[in-house]
Structures are given as C-alpha cells and as structure tokens.
Amino acid sequence: MFGLKADWSLEVFDRYFTLGDYAGGEARWCPGCGDFAVLNTVHRVLHDAQLPPERTVAVSGIGCSSRLPHYMGTYGFHGLHGRALPIASGIKSRRPDLDVWVATGDGDCFSIGAGHWIHAIRYNVDMVVLVFDNAIYGLTKKQTSPTSPTGLSTNTHPKGAPLPAMNPLTITLGITNVSFVAQCVDWNPPHMYETIKKAHKHRGTSFVRIIQRCPVFSPDVCKPLQEDSSRMLLLTHENGIPADDSVRRVFKEQREHDPGDWAAAMSIARDTSKIPIGLLYHDPDAPVYDDLSSRGLEATGAEKIAAVNKALDAFAI
Ligand code: SF4
C-alpha cells in the first residue's frame, strides 16, 4: 500500500532532542581555539545518542577547557582546580543512572590533579574523560604545563621549558585497571567524533587525550602537526576508531593496531617520533567500580541505619 515496502518501519521517539537542546551559554574562547571544535563534537555525540540533557552531567576543573559545562544544556559542575575526577566519580557513585562527562586540561589533570587522575583510571568508574591538551596553562596566560615541550618559551620559563614533556599516554597505560585510552586531534572533527562516540560507548573510564590548538599561547605546538600530517600515525583496526576515506586521506601514515594488545599500545605510546591517533587500548572487561559503589543505593533509611548498627555491633565488647 502506498508503495511502501513491507519491512518499512518508523522509529517513534517519545522525545526528540535537537542539537540546540545540548547547547548552553555562548562559548567564550579565543578565536581559533580548538575548544570550539571539541564542544561542537560533544554536542553532536550527545545528540546522535539522544541522551536526555537532564540525565547528563558535564564536570570540569579549572582552565580554559573547564568552561565547557557552561556551554552545555545539561547539568554541569565547574569544580576546583584538579578536582574534576573525584567530583565526577562521586556523582556517578550516587547517581549511576546519569551520563557523566569530564572536561579537563593538561594543567588541571596532569599536574595539580595527577593523584586523582591515577586513582580515577584505577577505579574505572563509568565516565568519559576528555583531556584538552594544549601543552600550556592558557587561562592564566602561558605558564609551563607538564606537557609543554622542551624549549617552549613560557612566562615561567622565558628561555624555554627545561624538562622533557610528560607522556600522558604511557602513564595512563601504566595504571592498574586501565580500560580505554584513545587520542585524537581537534582539527579533524570526523576522527574526533568517532573517538568520543566510541569512548562514550565504553563502560568504564574512557580516557581521551585531545591534542588541542591554543593559537594564542602555544601556536607552535600544533601547527607543525597540522602542516605535516606525516608526523602523525593513524591507528586502524576493526575494533578501533572507525576512520573513513576522508580521515585516511589526511593521515597517510597508518598502522594496524589491535587495541586489545597492551604491550603494543605501550610501545606505540613510547615512540615519540610519531604522534598516534586512534584507540591505543581497550579492555571492556576491566572491573568497574560502579558495580560496588551502587550496591545498596535502593535501601530505605531504616535499612541503612540497621546496616550501620550491625556493622558497629562487630566492635561491641
Ligand atoms: Fe583557547 Fe588558548 Fe584562548 Fe585558552 S588561551 S581560550 S586555550 S586559545
């Protein structure tokens, strides 16, 4: 009838969210800042997954990237410097039904928040952690960050950053119970979209390092990579980040890498002669702390008091 095929079906949504439903206030980053591309990509991933905005939380610490929750039409928590991860873990432990997203930066996560970074990866709470890494403290105007390359002139080291940059990939891969480590660049939205989408689908802590342009304070960090993509290595695999022809055309240096192979992931991450993008490591079976922390959440007040009293009885003499 009416020329429709017999297997034709119509998916009916109770509610349909537009891209605009995920947008918050007007984003105020510098012109050309890579943060805009990340924000737009996060909006698209949320939209395509049709996540209810009221069941989604964006959590951040302090820094340029940490302004992200203000630009989301979801719940948000703009926290303290370096403390996004414990706040996000706490939210998820009490409200496992929420979708938790973390926006943090290289200064926020790898310096003042480094202790939380290590333990968040080990606890493997189900959340997406997006690290906007521009190799500089941008918000406070150009101090050396843990990932500033040697020789980068900053306000704290005008003659050049003296130490080799930290390698966030090898460190994260080295943490017990790591379950998802990926890397992408903000100037290739199709690959970044697929990376964040895959991170969101993973149950556990998805660590995504986004190499992010800061044209104001560290323009020379990303420019050479943009101008010469042969300095980058696209990781491909059927279990990795999907890369269509447009992505493969840009990143001609490619390597087939099974994200289940931890040793190979570590070897790729250690080799700083090429910047890898794609999924380095994925263990979908790593224990997730949510399974423990969510126990007893449905208990009534009386049941909780009875459980506490029972535990205290163990100390009665
Ligand atoms: Fe972006 Fe850099 Fe400006 Fe911060 S200082 S908003 S990172 S361009």
Image (spheres, rainbow, N blue to C red):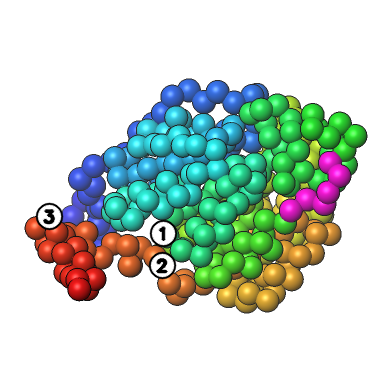
Position of the N terminus, as image quadrant, is bottom left
Would residue 232 be counted in the magenta stretch?
no
Residue 184 percent across, percent down from the top left: 64, 52
Q: Which residues are magenta?
A: 161-166
Q: Please name which of the two marks, 3 or 2, marks the residue nearer to the observer.
A: 3
CA–CA distance in space, label 3 to label 2: 26 Å
Q: Is residue 39 left or right of residue 13?
A: right
| Residue picked out by circle 1 | 126
SS category of the residue bearing label 1: loop
Along the line of sight, the residue nearer the viewer: 59 or 233: 59
| Residue picked out by circle 3 | 301
CA–CA distance in space, label 1 to label 3: 26 Å
Position of the C terminus, as image quadrant, is bottom left
Amino acid bearing label 1:
Asp
Q: Within 8 Å of ligand 1, the CB of disc 3?
A: no
Earlier-in-chain disc, 1 versus 3: 1
Image-quadrant location for residue 274: bottom right
Q: Is residue 147 left or right of residue 309?
A: right
Earlier-in-chain disc, 3 versus 2: 2
**Do tag 2 and tag 1 residues touch (Cβ < 8 Å)?**
yes
| Residue picked out by circle 2 | 288
Image-quadrant location for residue 169: bottom right
